[in-house]
Image (cartoon, rainbow, N blue to C red):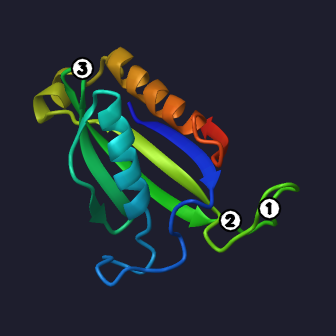
Amino acid sequence: MRHDLLFETERFNISEAGAHFINPNCFGEDLAAWLRGKLAARGVEAGEPDQEDWGWYLDATYKGRVYLVGVGGNPADEPEAAGRRTGRNRAEWRIMIEPHRSVWDRLKNVGRGAPQASADEELAHLVRDILAGEPDFHNIHAE
């Protein structure tokens, strides 16, 4: 089961495409690197960030399970709420947490519904706690 967490901040680059980006809207490199460090500080083994055409991702191991943790962002269009600074990096970011599942795992669960995902939910809560600890992150919510 995939868990999506969304939040807003101006901290990460959403306006300048890197020469190494797969496409000009492949933002999230700095967020993925930041999240990797935060996960490692909480005992989660996380690999080096890499990119896809939709954004950036890293592999993370938590409680014996391997996850794909993807990140991507969209520039905010509407004016900033009163009391907050506006800037060209204001964006809504999405963090996607999805367990890697083998073909065998997928086949054995056909017709039985989704398997229980307590460790998956715990990792999503851990990431949400990391986000909530940042004073310049706003509107943190699950989707």
**Residue on which the image places disc 1:** 80
Q: Which residue is at the front of the view, 80 or 41?
A: 41
Residue 12 shown left or right of residue 122 in the figure: right
Residue 69 position, x and y percent, is 34, 44
**Residue type at tag 2:** Ala
Residue 75 shown left or right of residue 62 in the figure: right
**137 to 80, vertically: above or below:** above
Q: Which residue is at the front of the view, 86 or 93?
A: 86
Q: Residues within 10 Å of mark 1 (few under 14, many from 20)?
A: few
**Which of the 4 image quadrants contains residue 52?**
bottom left
Which residue sits at x=30%, y=76%? 22
Residue 143 position, x and y percent, is 58, 38
Which residue sits at x=31%, y=53%? 57
Q: Which residue is at the front of the view, 14 or 100?
A: 14
Residue 26 position, x and y percent, is 40, 70
**Residue on which the image places disc 3:** 63
